[in-house]
Image (spheres, rainbow, N blue to C red):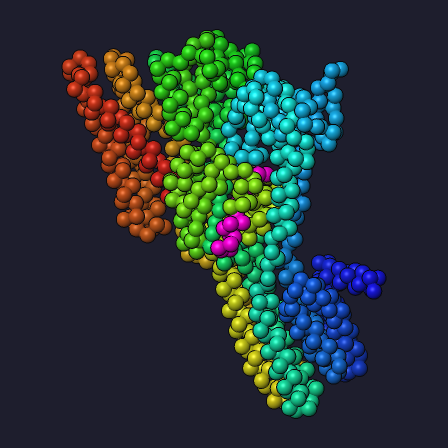
Amino acid sequence: MNHTAARLRHLTAAVVSPRLEPVLLAVTAVALTGGGIAWLADARGLADLFWALGTVSAVIPAIGWVLAALKRGQAGVDLIAVLALGGTLAVGEYLAGALIALMLATGRTLETAAQRRASHDLRALLEHAPRSARRRTDTGVATVPLGEVAVGDLLVVGPGEVIPVDGRVESTAAVLDESVLTGEPLQVERPRGETIRSGVVNAGGAFELRATAAEQDSTYAGIVRLAQQAGAESAPVVRLADRYAAWFLPLSLVVAGLAWLISGSAVRAVAVLVVATPCPLLLAAPVAIVSGLSRASRLGVVIRDGGALENLGRARTLLLDKTGTLTRGRPRGLDVTAAPGLKPTQVLRLAASVDQYSPHVLAQAIVDTARERNLELSAPTDVTEEPGRGATGTVNGHRVSIGRLGPADARPTWAKAVDNRALLDGAAVAWLTIDGQLAGAVLLRDPLRHDAPRTLRHLRAAGFERLLMLTGDRAAPAREVAAILGLDDVRAELGPADKVAVVRAEREAAVTVMIGDGVNDAPALAAADIGVAMGARGSTASSEAADIVLTTDRIDRIDRLADAVTIAQRARRIAVQSALGGMLMSLAAMAAAAVGLLPPAAGALLQEGIDVAVILNALRALRVDQAARPTLTPAAEALIHRFAAEHDDLQDVLDAVRAAADRLSDTPGPEALATVEETHRLLTARLLPHEYAEEHQLYPALAPTLGGSETTATMSRAHTEIERLSRRIATHLQLAHANGGLASEQLDDLRSCLYGLNTILRLHFTQEEENYFSLAP
């Protein structure tokens, strides 16, 4: 008995092989064509032989598909096809059988094309995990397999190595890249005695680690197990066609049985089954779904199977990772502060000059910021880098360092203000020293994607009723991002297991989508109804655990997911229309066959006509929905790129405005007046011409796309306020020149003008980048 069951399982596995469908399609097409040629040549016996062979070739795999479905507790459209094929063979209606075989093979081939099997082996998770550790013993340091590490062992972790097991820092402070677990790109420092988790990377110098857990009990091994369990517990998607077949199948059998019982003719029952063969389900629904997959792939949204597309169209809850999804995933220069006597551009240029050769993520961010502002960097000499502290080199005859300050290093008043701002903004600080003297600071933060607010609005419009952010970041910056984006909820300081728990809880209430991009997101992606990975920059693990991969992971392009939701809803709607319309026509044909008006062969031909109608309707899913996205003219797109580049170039002007206000607060003397004068010169020479050009070139070019000039009216009002404040600053300077310096009664208003102008400019730039610049690819 066991041997028979094993043989049956082996046979079922063989006939449901995904390689079988294209072969079956070719065989049935050749059999039907060969039979047609023989029939035209008046070789009726040969024609019947061809058609019978085509029918038989479909019966065996169809039985395998039915057995596989029954094993999963499903009885779908394939069962009707098996009954119809068997019936045509039983009564000798071979042409009808060959036609059904071709339809069945075509539908299965389309479905196989739509269902690219997702790989849930999480290869990247396993590849990232270390295989060995360096253990310190009385005789030295020896490399041992990771399985031999025991609690209490003293391990040595070198620069760039992955922490092998959970442990406690035993030597100097450890500088770590914890992005694998938290998703946050900024490095953290863990002092002696603090515990750290396996899987994170040593971004500083070598340190000693006291193991507090064995390999199988460590954090990283738990993530792998969690991802595998989450993927295994995800319920299989029930095909749209099978849901309709749940009532269409018994109805067809009842009608066929009644026709046979009342008429006494088995041919009538077979005719009913022939026209009842659910070709709208076998063909039309897969065609609509495959068309939707094709439309989505053109936008750079790769959906692994039709089930994921169907589910995406029904999703109502969206969970988003913060870093790399809502934010850029890489630090960027937020602001530059200079010590008295220096300019922010000088500080940034010197910092970037030293950092040019550093692989550090913050160093690269500083260099990118300087290049965005078109600063000319110098070639440093005698460059050295201390892991965890920063780089030092000689630039233009001065010894320049950029990086961390020690806790005991003295900080002047302006530097304390930088520390406070970094705390308030959730930013990292890179300090610049020149010849041993603190000279400035660069604040860095992972900024929001420009298109994030627009994308979330589109997703809400597409039907998502609940938007949540999940992050391993601290609560304060997470809440700030959530407030800016108008999210319904935020969960901060989450580990991979915590994210999975939240996803499971949300799945209880609605079909849930989870978007992430890191190794730490893989378990949550696998646990969600639909996992979406930011594939271009995301980890292989998250991509392999996901149902959807966004291959166009460029800045300002995550709104493609909103387009994919619209496509999924439209494809599903068309699939439902095609299926229901086709089944209604099939029901009418079944009634005709039951009373003897349709013989099997004629019924099969009529069913072919129904197929053509529903397939043509299903192909509408390929059509581009023009309303999904505003269409820009080439001229408008070029203007967007031009002004976006100017925004980057004008960041030093915004820094100068704030620096002038800060300088007035510190020492409102001649130096502060000179700073304000220089700031006004920058406003007049660079900023105001930019605003004027936007008002008279960019906004008119965008008005037709956005629906008229009224749509840019509020942004034009900001231009007016920027110009007003600039004129007010100019008036203060005229008064100062007339009075031989700034009068005390001027200071409050001048500071208000400068701080207010800085705030308006930053808000105005952000609004333009979000609402206008994100329209262009």
Q: Nearer the viewer, residue 533 or 722?
A: 533
Indicate left or right for 224 with 485 as reference.
right
Q: Can the viewer see residue 481 in this picture?
A: yes
Image: 481 above or below 61: above
Residue at (61%, 72%) from the top-left corner? 279
Q: Nearer the viewer, residue 428 or 296?
A: 428
**Residue 634 horizontal/vertical position (percent):** 42, 46
Q: Residue furthest bottom?
A: 263
Residue at (37%, 25%) from the top-left corner? 421
**Residue 610 horizontal/vertical position (percent):** 58, 75
Q: Nearer the viewer, residue 740 or 20?
A: 20
Residue at (63%, 89%) from the top-left corner? 596
User: In which quarter of the view is residue 603 placed?
Assistant: bottom right
Indicate left or right for 120 with 292 as reference.
right
**Residue 655 horizontal/vertical position (percent):** 35, 25
Q: Nearer the viewer, residue 223 or 185?
A: 223
Say whether residue 115 is magenta.
Answer: no
Residue at (55%, 74%) from the top-left corner? 582
Q: Which residues are magenta?
A: 503-521
Say whether residue 506 is magenta.
Answer: yes
Indicate left or right for 564 with 52 as reference.
left
Indicate left or right for 661 with 423 as reference.
left
